[in-house]
Amino acid sequence: MSAQLDPSNRLHPSTPGSADRRTWLGLAVLTLPVFLVSMDVSVLYLAIPSITDALAPSASEQLWILDIYGFLIAGLLITMGNVGDRVGRRRILLAGAGLFGVASVIAAFAPSAGVLIAARALMGVGGATLLPSSLSLIANMFPDARDRGRAIGVWTAAFAGGSAVGPVIGGVLLHHFWWGVVFLINVPVLVMLFVFGPRLIPEYRAASSEPFDVIGVVLSMAGILPLVYAVKTVASEGASIGVIAAGVVGAALLVAFLLHQRRIAAPLLDLKLFANTQFSAAVGVALIGMMALGGMSYLTGVYLQSVMGHDVLAAAIAGLPMAVAVAVFSVGATKVASIVGTRRAFLTSIALAAAGNLGLLALGTSSPVWVYILCTTVAGVGYGIQFSLVSVVVVGSVPPERSGAASGISETSFELGTAMGLALLGSLATLVFRAGNDGWSFGDTLGETLHRSTDMGPAGEGLATAAKQAFVDGMHAASLATGIALLALAAVLLVVLRDAPTDPDAQVAEVRVPDAEAVAPARAD
């Protein structure tokens, strides 16, 4: 592959060197869509009780409102990363932002759960264009290894910070407005992207004479969605012949997708990348880490409001220390790794995340809020470090002309991890909740059960107490599962990263930077 050039575009240096002021301003613009995409996964954690009151979704619809966004992003990220490489990363970024904004408005005024789910699906399609294009552009905008490491830290802080800050922002807004405002906040941010993006972000595309892999797109989507649906349904409602058949078909199509990728000249998913131990380890960290963060953020959001009785503003404030920890340590992750080594930084960060999640086992129906704050802050330090290092390793593993595809793989892991965390951990908590009825007649969700107990008057106090305890038991089961998964991941990394380089700057420096004729931005049409 070779890049298409625009000699007139002089916002960014074409040879390795320190980035100038306008390049860093361009990075600031790139963080806007990243922040929105990650925030829109978590912003609903605190809004779900309000949406439940307004739209009365079933337990399955409630999970799909949360899940469908992440599932479609996960299913399309690899495709959109490749599309951006071919048609232009800035172009696909702005096109996706437009779709994302329109879908956000539809979601804000959705009259039913079905419409909201459909709008969230459209947001997922738009969001899938934003993450790989923004991260891959960093490889072109920052040819200097150290600058690129810092830029990726900022990008990751926006991504991980958006996920952590989403509930906080949502809580503040929900304290004053109706639930739809959590979607409308996307619009002014996207307007800023459209105003400043064309001025500060260079266009880049990699020329390829190979045809686009349409068959791969179809096989990947046709495999991911039914398989995830089957896993989610079995976990929440039990197995049935139809559900098992869907899972088998999905798994078979994914196998066909992988075999197809091995045969073609220009694959969507470059399987050779996984021969790089660091790349494979980073993808695993992204998947398991985001599964733990996404699932537990959702459950603890419900816990703070429905079990502890905090309003949305108080719940949002309780989540602020974790948000700050994620953001700060995302930016400082490469510095930490340069001191202790990448391997130790990864292992320590995963251990901190595991400790924070396991600490949630101490929470009960009347625990002081400082216990929650302490545990989530410790976990936030771990998440901030590990997610930033994931992006550094992934971008540093490939040449810039393949960074869109590689970024698509890593972001697929992030988004699929979030969606699977919501589906699997949410379903596990629901199973435990339903099993803990102890003779009481629970509804499908804690919120529904608490509404029923309120209608019963004084006689409903016992039902409310039992339902809250059952939900806490379900949250404990999810906390234990995430803690074990993270510790198992750390054990694997202890082995597979044994011979990995210890200097993250050296890793990034290994990126092959083409000559000036190959890295200059493409001509914007």
Image: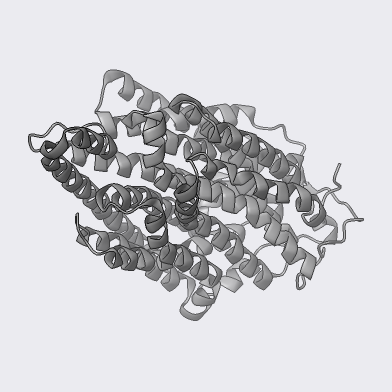
Taking the spot 55% from the left edge, 62% from the top edge, the residue there is 157
Question: Which residue reaches farthest top?
Answer: 242
Question: Horizontal placement of 440 versus 278: left or right?
Answer: left
- Asked whether 155 or 468 is in front, the reply is 468
Is residue 497 visible in this depiction of the protein? no
Q: How many marks?
A: 0
- Asked whether 186 or 100 is in front, the reply is 186
Image location (x, y in percent) of residue 520 = 83, 57
Question: Which residue reaches farthest bottom?
Answer: 339
Question: Horizontal placement of 168 versus 508: left or right?
Answer: left
Is residue 6 visible in this depiction of the protein? yes
Taking the spot 50% from the left edge, 45% from the top edge, the residue there is 177
Image location (x, y in percent) of residue 212 = 69, 32
Q: Quadrant of residue 88?
A: top right
Image location (x, y in percent) of residue 49 = 36, 41
Question: Which residue reaches farthest left?
Answer: 439
Q: Quadrant of residue 271?
A: top right
Question: Horizontal placement of 320 versus 393: left or right?
Answer: left
Q: Quarter of the image for the C terminus: give it.
A: top right
What sort of colour scheme is used for the picture? Answer: one colour
Residue 209, placed above or below residue 517:
above
Taking the spot 26% from the left edge, 41% from the top edge, the residue there is 428
- Asked whether 222 or 352 is in front, the reply is 352
Question: Which residue reaches farthest front?
Answer: 457
- Asked whether 208 or 51 is in front, the reply is 51
Image location (x, y in percent) of residue 23 = 76, 64
Residue 326, placed above or below residue 94:
below
Taking the spot 22% from the left edge, 45% from the top edge, the residue there is 471
